[in-house]
C-alpha cells in the first residue's frame, strides 16, 4: 500500500470520529442566552467582526473614524462590498463566513446580503444558539467573564448564568495590566481601593476577586500579556500579577491561562481591529513554571516564532498545558504546522484548538476548518505509526481526539496536579 493510500484510509477513520462532535471550546467570547445583549449573533455582527474589519481597511476608501461613526448595519454593508463583492473572499475569515452561511443553508452569492438579512429576520436567539452549537459539534464553551465590565457585572447580579453549556472563565486583563483606569470601576462596586498600590488596596483587590470567584465559580482565570511582560521589572502590573493574580489563583486552586504576545493598539484608530503580535521572551514563562510548581498554567502564544519554544517548555514542566492556535495563528497553514509540531514533541497532551469565537456563528466555521486540518495531521501520524508496526484501534482514536479537543484540558484543570 502506498503512503498516500494508507494516510487516506486513516483520514476517513479520523474524520468519522471528529464528525461525532463532543468538543469543549476552552476559550471564546460568547455568552449564554440569558446574557441579553451581550450575546452576539446575526449577519451584521459577523460582518463587523474585527478580523473582517481589519481586512476591509486594506481596501476601503474611507478613514477608520468615518467608518466607526456609521451604524453597525452600514458598516456591515461596507465590509460586504469590500471583501465579498469587490474581490473574492480568499482570506481565512472571509472563507469562514462562506462556510458558516452554507452550513446554515444559505447561498451567499445567490442570496446576497439582502437575502441573508431576510433569512435572519425569522430566527429566534435562544433557538439559534442551540442550532449553532449543534452544527458546530461543540458541547460546551468557556465564556470570557469580566467582573469589571459594568454590563456583564449587571448580568451576573441579575442571575444570568444557569446554562450548563456556557462555562465560566474569570478574565482579569484590566485589573492587572491597566489598574489606573480600572480602579474606579472596582471602587464603584464598593471596594476601598485607590490608584496607588498600598497594602490596603491590594487586600481590597484580592477581596474583589474573592467575591467574583464565589459568584462566577470559574474553571480558570485568564489574562492576555504583551510580549514584553516581565514578572520582576518593578512595575505596577508585575506586582499585581504576583501579589494579586498568582496569590488569588494559589488560594483558590485556580489554573491560570496566559495568552502571551499581543501588542494592543498597534494602530489605535482601528479600535479592536488595531491589535498586533510580537515575539515574547518565554524566559518569563519558564521562571513562572519553575517557581510556582503547584500552579497550573494553560498557555497559548501569538507569535509563530514562539511556538516551538512553548512545546519545549511543556516537555520540561508538567504544570504547563499548551492550548489553541490563537488569533493570527488560527489559519490553516499555521494550525497545521503548530499541531504537527505539538504532536511530535508532546504526543496528545495539549489542547489542539480553542475558537476565540466572538459571534455565535463563528463556532461553525472555526470548528469545521480546524477539524479538517486535525483530520489531516492525525491521519498522517496514525499512518506513520501503522507503517512502524502499531495499529491504533477505533477506541484509541476516540480517546486521542477526546484528549485533544477538551478532555485533556478538563483533566488538567480538574486535576489539581503538581508539577
Ligand atoms: O481573537 C480575538 O478575538 C482577540 O480579539 C482577542 O480577544 C483575544 O483572543 C483575547 O482574548 O484577548
Ligand atoms: Zn480571546
Image (cartoon, rainbow, N blue to C red):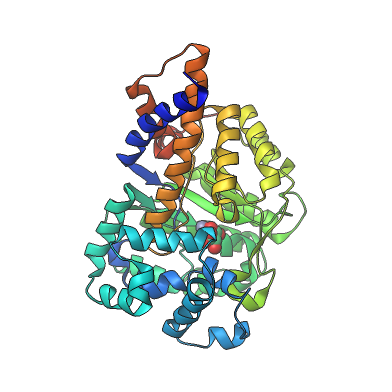
Q: Is residue 313 above or below residue 62?
A: above
Q: Residue 345: percent from the left, percent from the top? A: 61, 28
Residue at the image position 49 percent from the left and 64 percent from the top: 94
User: Is residue 340 at least partly visible in the picture?
Assistant: yes
Q: Residue at x 71, y 54 (%)?
A: 227
Seen from this angle, which residue lies furthest top?
389
Indicate whether 237 appears above or below 12.
Answer: below
Q: Nearer the viewer, residue 205 or 296?
A: 296
Which is more toward the observer, 253 or 10?
A: 10
Quarter of the image for residue 47 reads bottom left
Which of 301 and 185 lies nearest the eye of the viewer? 301
Q: Residue at x 63, y 73 (%)?
A: 58
The residue lying at 46 percent from left, 55 percent from top is 170
Seen as rendered, the residue at the extreme right is 233
> Percent position (x, y) of residue 29?
44, 60
Left or right of residue 22: residue 334:
right
Q: Quadrant of residue 101?
A: bottom left
Amino acid at each position: 500500500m502506498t503512503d498516500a493510500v494508507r494516510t487516506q484510509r486513516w483520514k476517513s477513520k479520523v474524520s468519522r470520529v471528529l464528525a461525532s462532535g463532543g468538543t469543549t471550546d476552552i476559550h471564546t467570547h460568547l455568552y449564554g442566552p440569558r446574557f441579553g445583549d451581550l450575546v452576539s449573533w446575526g449577519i451584521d455582527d459577523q460582518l463587523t467582526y474585527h478580523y473582517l474589519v481589519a481586512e476591509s481597511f486594506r481596501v476601503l476608501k474611507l478613514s477608520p473614524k468615518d467608518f466607526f461613526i456609521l451604524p453597525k448595519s452600514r458598516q456591515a454593508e461596507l465590509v460586504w462590498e469590500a471583501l465579498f463583492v469587490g474581490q473574492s473572499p480568499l482570506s481565512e475569515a472571509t472563507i469562514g463566513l462562506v462556510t458558516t452561511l452554507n452550513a446554515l443553508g444559505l447561498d451567499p452569492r445567490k442570496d446576497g446580503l439582502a437575502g441573508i438579512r431576510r433569512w435572519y429576520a425569522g430566527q429566534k436567539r435562544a433557538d439559534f444558539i442551540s442550532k449553532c452549537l449543534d452544527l458546530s459539534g461543540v458541547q460546551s464553551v468557556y465564556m470570557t467573564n469580566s467582573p469589571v465590565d459594568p454590563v456583564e457585572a449587571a448580568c451576573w447580579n441579575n442571575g444570568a448564568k444557569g446554562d450548563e453549556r456556557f462555562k465560566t472563565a474569570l478574565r482579569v486583563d484590566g485589573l492587572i495590566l491597566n489598574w489606573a483606569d480600572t480602579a474606579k470601576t472596582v471602587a464603584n462596586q464598593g471596594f476601598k481601593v485607590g490608584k496607588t498600590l498600598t497594602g490596603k488596596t491590594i487586600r481590597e483587590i484580592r477581596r474583589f476577586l474573592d467575591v467574583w470567584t464565589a459568584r462566577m465559580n470559574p474553571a480558570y482565570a485568564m489574562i492576555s500579556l504583551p510580549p514584553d511582560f516581565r514578572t520582576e521589572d518593578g512595575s505596577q502590573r508585575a506586582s499585581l500579577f504576583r501579589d494579586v493574580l498568582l496569590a488569588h489563583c494559589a488560594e483558590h486552586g485556580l489554573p491560570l491561562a496566559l495568552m502571551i504576545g499581543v501588542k494592543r493598539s498597534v494602530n489605535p484608530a482601528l479600535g479592536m481591529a488595531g491589535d498586533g503580535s510580537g515575539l515574547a521572551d518565554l524566559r518569563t514563562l519558564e521562571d513562572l513554571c519553575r517557581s510556582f510548581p503547584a500552579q497550573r498554567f494553560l498557555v497559548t502564544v501569538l507569535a509563530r516564532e514562539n511556538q516551538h519554544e512553548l512545546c519545549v517548555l511543556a516537555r520540561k514542566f508538567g504544570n504547563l498545558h499548551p492550548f489553541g492556535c490563537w488569533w493570527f495563528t488560527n489559519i490553516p497553514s499555521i494550525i497545521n504546522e503548530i499541531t504537527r509540531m505539538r504532536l511530535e514533541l508532546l504526543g496528545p497532551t495539549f489542547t489542539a484548538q480553542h475558537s476565540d469565537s466572538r459571534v455565535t456563528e463563528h463556532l461553525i466555521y472555526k470548528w469545521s476548518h480546524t477539524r479538517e486540518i486535525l483530520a489531516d495531521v492525525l491521519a498522517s501520524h496514525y499512518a506513520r505509526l501503522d507503517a512502524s508496526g502499531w495499529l491504533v484501534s477505533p477506541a484509541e482514536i476516540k480517546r486521542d481526539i477526546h484528549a485533544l479537543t477538551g478532555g485533556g484540558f478538563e483533566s488538567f484543570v480538574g486535576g489539581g496536579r503538581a508539577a
